[in-house]
Amino acid sequence: MGNFRVQSCPKLKIIKESYVKPRNFHNESPKNQINLGLTDLFMLTMDTMQKGLLFNTKLSPNFLEKLENALHVSLVYFYPLAGRFATKKFYDEHACSFYLDCEAGSRARLIHAAVDCTVSDILSSVDVHPIVKSFFDLGDKSVNHDGHTRPLLSVQVTELHDGVFIGFTMNHCIADGTSLWHFISTLSEVFNQIKDDDENEGKSIFISRKPIFETLFPHKGYDPNFKLPYLEPEEFINRYDPGSLRVRIFHFSKQSIATLKAQANSECGLRNNISSFQALSAFMWRSITRARNLRPDDEIGCSIVINARTRLDPQLPPEYFRCFLTAAQCTSTVRDLLSNELGRAALLVNQCIKSHDEKAFKSLVKLFEEHPFVVQPGPRSAYYKPNGVTIGGSIRFDMYGPEFGLGKAVAVLAGYASKEDGKVTANPGRDGDGSVDLEVCLKPETMNALELDQEFMRFVSCV
């Protein structure tokens, strides 16, 4: 497990690049401008989102044409993804506000590329293969604020010798994981309805879940021109370099997770109050902390990213297309976390998540409204803890449903975005049986120690 070595990386060949706009047949005129409000602006200086699907099927001759047509049609419903950001400056207040111009640019990026490797090369790699980062927007690194000049959506189709990877890069200011997978599922749904001899250019195509772009939060009547206390990007943009990291995917079977859940509930004296995800999160927090070999009195934290739609009463629908996230912050010391059982850590995670209800979320938004700021990556973040763990993603997303006529994907992979020491991203396992894949980003020495930790590895069913 510890015999990690740096892999050589084949060169990516760009075949074609184009820009796709919404097809003009919508019955209703879309908004020309969408103001970016409170919850949209948290992520301005953070990385974009990147998720993609690996298939072990080769492309048909007309695949790219069908995908481009599907993108034309899908952008009719997801029209903000073809826009660009714009800034209004208020010099007398030393402030600015942001909005989404749905007409400026009016294009999403579509890339066709090829690389000299196989599906097996990708799947057999101990760590995530370094070529994978080039499968998203050609490997170009950007932050969400770059949406002023860069497309808010990029779709890259990369052909391998015996398969294909479809990588999606989406601006994180206007969408979160719920919205990203909503779009990917819709694009696949549209793709599967397109006929080679379609003379109506997709007018008869049906989508099962239309996105909602109307502002449903915060309260009606709030100032849509929400201002941040900056004039120039240099005042708040931080292009953070996390340094050398290893990124590896660990697979946890349904049985392993059930064992952790039962152990956590038994140890804290509860009957099924600790969920599978909470038990797994606590297990990862403890395992990574142990691998870091910290001092007993060191303070540590675990931040769990939560879909804020579910925190409100009534809940907002999953079709609400926004970046609508919050985070539960758990804190402890190394001694308290590791000298006690898994159940103690799981109970702490459980209580932190439960306490992050509608009242807590609205308090956070009110604080942001009164004292605006932009969330920073790395050490400059108000939430940063040098020995922290951040758990994101979701095991509830339908990641293996979108097939694009290629059959079921063999893997879900991510690009360079949002990688930092201690970041854990949860994805559902491919078999859909309750198994979970965790993408774990750690400093090399910490990953080496984690791989040698028998208490951790005995729960990893397949790597």
Image: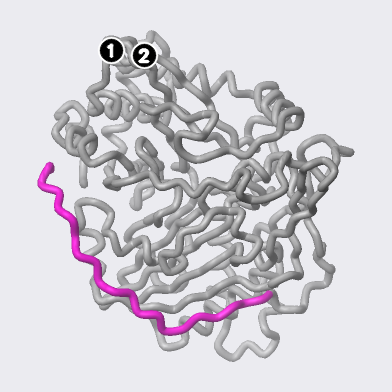
Q: For residue 265, say whether it is visible.
A: no
Q: How far from the left and from the top, in percent, is residue 167?
A: 44, 65
Amino acid on which disc 2 is placed: Thr
For this rendering, which residue is in front, 433 or 136? Answer: 136
Query: Which residue is located at x 82 percent, y 62 percent?
Result: 31
Q: How far from the left and from the top, in percent, is residue 145?
A: 61, 54
Judge the density around disc 1: few (<14), some (14-19), many (≥20) Cα neighbours within 10 Å: few
Report the Cα–Cα distance between label 1 and label 2: 7 Å
The label number, if any, that marks residue 333 in the structure image: 2
Q: Which residue is mark 1?
A: 296
For this rendering, which residue is in front, 101 or 178? Answer: 101
Contact flag, marks 1 and 2 (Cβ < 8 Å): yes
Position above or below: 376 against 175: above
Among the 4 quarters of the image, the one containing residue 277: top left
Query: Which residue is located at x 30 percent, y 75 percent?
Result: 115
Q: How far from the left and from the top, in percent, is residue 278?
A: 42, 26
Among the 4 quarters of the image, the one containing residue 270: top left
Among the 4 quarters of the image, the one containing residue 134: bottom left
As drawn, is 199 to the left or to the right of 296?
right
Q: Secondary structure at mark 2?
A: strand
**Magenta stretch holds residue 16:** yes
Mark 1 or mark 2, earlier in chain: 1
- Highlighted range, magenta: 1-21
As drawn, is 222 to the left or to the right of 441?
right
Position above or below: 129 against 364: below
Query: Which residue is located at x 32 percent, y 32 percent?
Result: 257
Farthest left residue?
3
Amino acid on which disc 1 is placed: Pro
For this rendering, which residue is in front, 393 or 301? Answer: 301
